[in-house]
Image: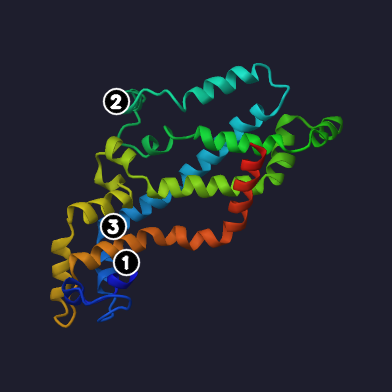
């Protein structure tokens, strides 16, 4: 995809591009980045990913910590009710009706609030919290700390691996998500970049723009194929750039959760 996105469109259409760029140029990326709809949707995706991940990780941790403590009254009942939602749910139409009746339709909160907690991720985080020694909690209680102080000052600092893992999972999900936006959003100004990319890749709705760009420089042809792959590369680049910095936490968090489970 990267090779085709920076190759001459005519050579791409003839099948002359293999393992190295042919007719190297950045015209496809210029065409994509000059489209105001793509820039706006790119910003929307950043907002959805940032706010959504903060909401997800925060609420998941707040749900997982009490369930990890043996002293919680009715712990088994709450756990059963939460896990039940993994197997039984209303479906698309009931979810749409709930979002509509709450007045969230055609707003950013329709994207952020319904998927606030992923039950499977919550179970992973609860399992990690359960592995923290009880002696730390008991000593903190003796020193006068309450549950909130213990959670904020002891549990969370010791849980950076699983928090980084959950942040990665949730951020990737928000960045790649397009189906909720298709259901709940009607205003094009609120569309994430995945909706725009779907239109370009599946429906080919940027063909006219691509030919207009090629007309500005007759020595370089920018085809719809160049545009498609350029949009895909631009879309996945932020995740590829962030992942190396949290990879060690990602691997450690997944392995600890699986062993404890």
> Which residue is rendered at x = 44% and y = 35% of the image?
115
Q: Secondary structure at mark 3?
A: helix
Figure coloring: rainbow
Point out residue 122 in the picture as x, y percentages from the top left corner.
56, 35
Viewed as shown, does residue 258 lie left or right of 2? right
Instruction: Name the quadrant of the N terminus.
Output: bottom left
Label 1 Cα neighbours within 10 Å, binned few <14 / some 14-19 / many ≥20? few
> Is there CB contact under 8 Å for labels 1 and 2?
no
The one of 141 and 21 positioned closer to us in this rendering: 21
Q: Residue at x 17, y 79 (%)?
A: 217
The residue mark sitting in front, 2 or 3, is: 2
Q: State the separation of the CA atoms marked 2 and 3.
A: 29 Å
Mark seen at residue 68? none
* Contact between labelled residues 3 and 2, with CB atoms less than 8 Å apart: no
Pick whichever, 188 or 72, lies toward us: 72
Q: Which comes before the other along the chain, label 1 or label 3? A: 1
First in sequence: mark 1 or mark 2? 1
Sooner in the amino-acid sequence: mark 2 or mark 3: 3
Q: Which residue is mark 3?
A: 38
Q: Secondary structure at mark 2?
A: helix
Disc sitting over residue 1 in the figure: 1
Mark 1: secondary structure: loop
Question: Is 122 positioned to the left or the right of 50 in the image?
Answer: right
Query: Which residue sits at x=47%, y=48%?
Result: 171
Residue that numbered label 2 is attached to:
93
On the image, the x and y values in percent for residue 231 come to: 30, 61
Spot occupied by residue 239 in the image (x, y as percentages of width and height)? 45, 57
Give the alpha-carbon distance from disc 1 to disc 2, as whole Å: 37 Å
For image coordinates 37% across by 54% down, the residue present is 43
Which quarter shows the C terminus?
top right
Q: Could you say where residue 153 lies in the image, as x and y percent from the top left?
A: 73, 41
């Amino acid at each position: 995809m990267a090779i085709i996105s920076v190759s001459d469109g005519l050579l791409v259409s003839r099948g002359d591009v293999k393992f190295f760029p042919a007719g190297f140029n950045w015209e496809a990326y210029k065409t994509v980045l000059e489209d105001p709809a793509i820039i706006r949707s790119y910003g929307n995706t950043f907002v959805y990913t940032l706010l959504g991940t903060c909401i997800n990780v925060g609420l998941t941790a707040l749900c997982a910590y009490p369930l990890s403590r043996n002293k919680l009254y009715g712990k088994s009942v709450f756990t059963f009710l939460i896990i039940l939602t993994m197997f039984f749910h209303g479906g698309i139409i009931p979810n749409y009706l709930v979002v509509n009746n709450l007045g969230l339709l055609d707003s950013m909160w329709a994207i952020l609030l319904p998927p606030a907690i992923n039950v499977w991720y919550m179970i992973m985080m609860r399992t990690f919290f359960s592995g923290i020694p009880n002696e730390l909690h008991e000593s903190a209680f003796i020193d006068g700390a309450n549950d909130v102080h213990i959670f904020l000052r002891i549990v969370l600092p010791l849980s950076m691996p699983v928090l980084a893992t959950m942040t990665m999972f949730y951020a990737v999900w928000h960045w790649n998500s397009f189906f909720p936006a298709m259901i709940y959003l009607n205003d094009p100004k609120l569309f994430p970049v995945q909706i725009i990319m779907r239109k370009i890749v599946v429906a080919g709705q940027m063909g006219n723009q691509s030919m207009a760009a090629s007309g500005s420089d007759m020595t370089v042809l920018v085809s719809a194929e160049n545009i498609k792959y350029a949009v895909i590369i631009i879309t996945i680049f932020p995740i590829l750039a962030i992942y190396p910095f949290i990879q060690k936490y990602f691997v450690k968090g997944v392995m600890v959760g699986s062993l404890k489970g």
